[in-house]
Image (cartoon, helix red, strand yellow):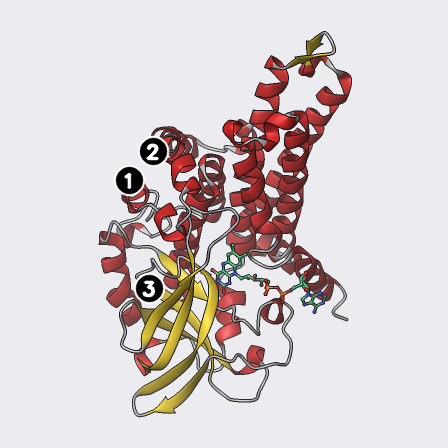
Amino acid sequence: MEEIFIANDEQRAILATVARFVEEVVAPRAPLLDADPDPEKSFSWEIVEKADAVGIRTMTLSEKWGGLGADSLTSAMVIEELGKGDLGVSVVMAQTLKIAQIMQKALNEEQQARVLPGFAQDPRGVLAIGITEPDNASNYFLPHPTPFRTGARRAAGGWVVNGMKHFISNGNRASHYLLFAQTEPGRPMAEASTCFLVERGRPGFTIGRVHDKMGERLANNAELIFQDCFIPDENVVGKVGNGFSVLAEFFPQSNAYAGASVLGVAGALHQKAIDWAKVRVQGGKPLIEHDGIRAQLAEMRMLIDASRSYIHRACWLADHPEHGWDRTLGALPKAMAAQAAWKIATWTMEIHGGHGYMKELGVEKLVRDAAAFLHSDGVNRTLFLKAANFMFRD
Ligand SMILES: Cc1cc2nc3c(=O)[nH]c(=O)nc-3n(C[C@H](O)[C@H](O)[C@H](O)COP(=O)(O)OP(=O)(O)OC[C@H]3O[C@@H](n4cnc5c(N)ncnc54)[C@H](O)[C@@H]3O)c2cc1C
């Protein structure tokens, strides 16, 4: 099934490497890490280092910076493949791959030369983006005229930042962050916020709580806390007051990558449903010979294939916008994949009967994981509204 969209030999070779990495490195470790009650211990540097060793961590860096220069379509294929092994691992890498892409477009030459070589050489280099705050969440997906609470005040040679972000993927693990802060108090965030490059360990910047999560546990989410944190002018990304254009202009495929991560979980669930239906005998024959079950397995396949097509179209058009990129593609593919994954999760559990609810077959972990993207990267309802606002702007 996965073969349908693999266009060329290079993508096949990359995906074979990723599939091997998932089988040898991720799959044996994921259940134990997921079961650790301490969220920080569910994260594995060993997995990140091994992902680095096979070239996954840096694959979206251009060859100039030591990467493969992978395009968005290939990256989405890789992110989905990782998601089949574990959603958290897929998210740790997807965040890093996408932010590396943004950095190569949005950072100026001096900033790139300062940041990218170190990132490329650090086998533990992962990246994070800090936008969401306790009071401002969907407000930035559906730009609402509130300011961010995290504020940057002008000072000699730079900005002094105070405030906090929460829920940030890789928040406690990243070497570099893109941080969105209000640079003009009282005005709407979409018009008066700025994107800053922040290095780990900058004085005044600390990590707060690491959130304990229902699923996607192999990725960490954390609070970022800023207390009189000085950020020099040379760390402003783009123009002051133009933070939102960094998001809109430089990262159209973010939503599709999120969709690819959760689509990997849908694929893993589907495989489990098929495997179980073949061995479980009830009503005198294997479940797979019962028409109701067979039809449901085909419907799952349809949902996965259609979601993948949508994600791939969004990724390809994000790289080739002149062929018809439209902004709904930056909002809807993730919503479709997340809804598909959630449906497939509940159906897979149903096909497993009581065995699906018990932990031993691993369905329960995948159900918890599948729930993550109903909210992550924008709640689906707000994404539908966002797309509608693009469609009916006039
Ligand atoms: C696993 C995970 C990883 C994340 N990673 C990051 C990250 O790396 N960086 C980052 O910045 N953020 C991150 N987030 C935050 C994520 O973007 C937010 O959770 C998301 O924007 C929704 O915010 P909220 O959860 O506070 O919900 P709220 O905004 O409080 O929404 C609650 C409900 O109200 C609805 N609602 C809100 N506004 C409207 C409206 N105007 N009209 C109609 N309905 C509305 C929503 O659809 C939702 O159903 C992550 C979240 C999760 C769960």
Q: Which residue bears the numbered disc 3?
A: 176
Mark 3 is surrounded, within 10 Å at the Cα level, by few (under 14), some (14 to 19) or many (20 or more) other residues, namely many
Where disc 2 sits, the SS reads helix
Quadrant containing the N terminus is top right
Of 292 and 194, the residue lying toward us: 292
Q: Type of residue at label 3?
A: His
Residue at left 62%, top 71%?
139
Dot 3 or dot 2, earlier in sequence: 2
Rendering quarter of residue 195: bottom left
Q: Horizontal and vertical percent for residue 327? A: 63, 60
Q: Which residue is drawn at 34% across and 33% down?
A: 25
Q: Is residue 191 left or right of residue 110?
A: right
Identify which amino acid the numbered label 1 is placed on: Lys
Q: Would you call the spot at circle 1 few (<14 residues within 10 Å), some (14-19), or many (20 or more)?
A: some
Mark 3 or mark 2, whichever is nearer to me: 2
Q: Pick the residue in front: 51 or 40.
A: 40
Q: Name the residue under label 1.
A: 50
Q: How far apart are marks 3 and 2 (CA)?
A: 25 Å
Question: Horizontally, is 153 left or right of 330 in the view?
Answer: left
Q: Which residue is drawn at 64% across and 76% down?
A: 144
The reply to whether dot 1 and dot 2 touch (C-beta < 8 Å) is: yes
Label 2 belongs to which residue?
A: 25
Q: Which of marks 1 and 3 is nearer the N terminus?
A: 1
- Classify mark 3: helix, strand or loop: strand
- Report the Cα–Cα distance between label 1 and label 3: 20 Å
Please tell me whether residue 226 is drawn above or below residue 273 in the rendered image: below
> Is residue 173 visible in this depiction of the protein?
yes
